[in-house]
Image (cartoon, helix red, strand yellow):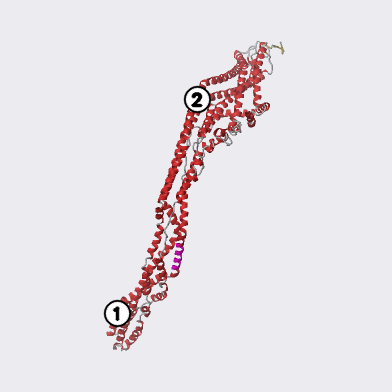
Amino acid sequence: MALLLDVLLLLGLWANTISGGQPASTNRPGDFNYELPATKYETRDDYEAGPAGLLFHMVHLFLYVVQPRDFPIDSIREILKQKSEPSIDYQKVAYYEMGIIICAVLGLLFVILMPVVGFFFCMCRCCNKCGGKMHQRQKKSGRCQRKCFAVSLLVMCFLISIGIFCGFVANIHVQTWMNNTQKLATSNFKDLRTLLNETPKQIHYILAQYNTTRDQAFSDLDRIHTLLGAGILEKLKPEVVPVLNDVKAMATAIIRTHESLENMENSLQSLSNGSSQLNNSLTNVKDNIQNSLNDNDCSSARDQETCNRVRASLSQLEINPELGQLPSVDQQLSRVNEILKTDLDKLATQGSRSLEDIPNTIKNQTTEVVADVKAVLNSIGHNIDSVSQQIPIQSTLSSFEDYLNDTEYYFYYYTSIVEKNDSFWWLSSLIICFLLSLIVLFFYLGLLCGICGYDRHATPTTRGCVSNMGGIFLMTGVGLSFLFCWILMFIVTLTFVIGANMEKLVCEPYANKKLFQVLDTPYLLNQDWKYFLSGMMFSSSDIELTFEQVYSDCKNDKGVYTALQLQHIFNIDDHLNIQQHTGNIMREFENLNLRLDSITLLDDAGRRNLQEFAESGVDKLAYDTYLAQADKSPVKTNLLGFASILEAEANRLSSGSLRQSLKTEAQTIRTIYQHQVLPMEQSLSTLQQSVQILQHTTSGLPTKVAKILYNLDSAQNFVTNNTSSIIVKETKQFVTTIIGYFEHYLQWVKFAISEKMATCKPMATALDSAVKVFLCGYTVDPLNLFWFGIGKATVFLLPALILAVKLAKYYRQMQSEDIYDNGVRF
């Protein structure tokens, strides 16, 4: 009970000393995953009785049969309040204690009647009555009776032995409880010291986590140009970047158009010059061939036909006259050259660079604000540290430690006294068990000697000494039973009344928490206080702080702050006001006035450049005409084929100057093809490629440029009109992130202080150790098992002694016996 009182006083002292102040709580998990290091305690919160638990459970079942009624909460409350009439109280107590009273009355009757019966039994036997006369009548059923008496006595002795065994188990359990109690107390004291020692460490850990939060916030503030600036930039990019990319693509198109026009102009010039030269060359060839054909060499009939064919083919040596007449693109090329004097790509890049410079602009404009916010964050850390200093935790712990030292000293002091006197209890219980064992031993010896020494052929007067000794042992056991069984029953009755009431009125109500419900009865422990704990701890006793709630919270490993509702003494919400701290940060961020200079995506020069390109006329060129002529050959016929045919015709002629002249002209035609036609064909190929590129590039050019200018105006309007709102939105999001770190930290601080810091589970464990383990497990259960075993053995002594008296007649040597002569007894 000393440990129980120590725990209750410790709980009260904790409440009184904490009254100086302690923070409150709220739970919220977050990105940093703060977690208070768990404290490990040695004492187990469960109790196992071991193999003896089965015997204890058997006793509990017996007590339930004797006392099946529920714990009388209302009656106990009325008795404690002393408001009920005495008669009503006694009636209710008697009704609840009916089973225990009946058993106690039967036990007392046993105690009173057993000595009286023993006295008269002794006097009766001294007068040779009640089986005292050493004479036995022989009956036909004697053998059967002897066996029945022996078996019945053996069964009784076995049942008595079981009861004695229970008594020995209870005695051994009591003998070992002292060492277990010391270990249990040492473990509980160590856990309580661990609670006191770990609490300052937990406070330091909570404060240290602020550095993690602050460092993260500082990191974000140092990267404000990346986080805030990039956020603003990302909001503008979807509207701006596609337009600028289109402008850059159009700048590339202008360059490609210029290159294509230059190639086209060069090709047209080359074709014009080449056509003139080719025409002259072919004319000369035709004239030379015509002159040769007019020679007399064609006068012969055989050659005349050949000459006519050659003369007729000369009409094929004609150029394509349209090649030299293709229109020039010099005017369009001049316009594009003027357009290229403005670097459109550079202007678009300047627009992109004005966007990319937003992060640097943000960094330059937030330098002072960032420094001020950092100062506020540092001040919050100092404020949290000062709040922790306001909590009188150190003085509380020192008071606890002094009280705990005194409690531990007194506990071990009185424990040593109990250890010295424990031997008396153990020796007394051992004497009782050995006394019963001695009685049973005499019964066993009597049975053994009687059965082993019995001779069925011997008459009652001629029985052997072994059989006679068995009868003496049985009667010795009977005599000891009459001498001591009433004393044993008195001890059993006394311990039964104490142990049964302790089990039904303390242990069971404690296990199902009904005992706490009695203690939590308003105005019970103090007529001026509605709730006793509230009146003891707070200025108002109306606060619903109950023993059951405190015990349950501590059992569930909650913090002392929550379990004892210390927010009524020191409200952490008032000292760690999240809105106040975040408001300070917000006020600093209100000074953040971000200004982005007007962002011009493309200036007027660039816009004019685009418009001039759209009006340059390159999209109106006769591309189909150019492509149609580019597919044609510079000459109407294949000159190489014509030269081969001419040479073949020359070979048909007779040898002479005409033949040689035609062959020379055929070679000249081949030379013309190599030096004039092939370059012209190359120019036509270049012209075709350039025209195709231009046609693709300038297809729908005015529409494309108009669309780019429209999108450019839309993007410029978006930037002009929405940049401010984007800045506000992104700044708010950034500020929310920074504040979120500290909101989360402060929420966790509240949660840690209320739920995790200084968890009072060691207190609940200490209370369980005092009541459930020490009082009920180490004391009440062995006590109940003791009276259950000894009482069982004592009760079975009554039929055992009767059977022993009956059986002794069959084993002892009689002084006289019945004599029969021809079937007649004398």
C-alpha span from label 2 to label 1: 137 Å
Q: Which amino acid, mark 1?
A: Thr
Q: Is 795 on the left-hand or right-hand side of 405? A: right
Residue located beneath label 2 in the image: 410
Was residue 129 drawn as part of the magenta stretch in this picture?
no
Question: What element does badge 2 sit on?
Answer: helix
Q: Position of residue 664 (x, y in %)?
A: 28, 81
Residue 784 appearing in the image = yes
Q: Residues within 10 Å of mark 2 (few under 14, many from 20)?
A: some
Looking at the image, is 62 positioned above or below residue 558? above
Q: Which image quadrant for residue 173? A: top right
Q: Which residue is mark 1?
A: 668
Q: Report the residue at 64% width, 32% height from top.
A: 74
Residue 444: x percent and y percent? 59, 19
Which x, y percent locates residue 229? 42, 54
First to last magenta residue range: 704-716
Quarter that holds the C terminus: top right
Give whichever of discs 2 and 1 has the lower sequence position.
2
Q: Is residue 249 left or right of residue 522?
A: left
User: Residue at 51% across / 35% down in the picture?
Assistant: 19
- Inspect the image, locate mark 2, and give the three-letter code of the amino acid beneath it: Tyr
Q: Residue furthest left?
A: 657
Quadrant position of residue 50: top right
Question: To which quarter of the image does residue 822 belong?
Answer: top right
Secondary element type, mark 1: helix
Q: Is residue 685 visible?
A: no
Crowd tier of the residue under label 1, counting other residues whose Cα lies within 10 Å: few below 14, some 14–19, many 20 or above: some
Tell me the quadrant of the picture where the N terminus can be found. top right
745 versus 814 height, above or below: below
The kind of secondary structure the magenta stretch mainly shows is helix
Q: Nearer the viewer, mark 2 or mark 1?
A: 2
**509 or 695, which is in the foreground?**
509
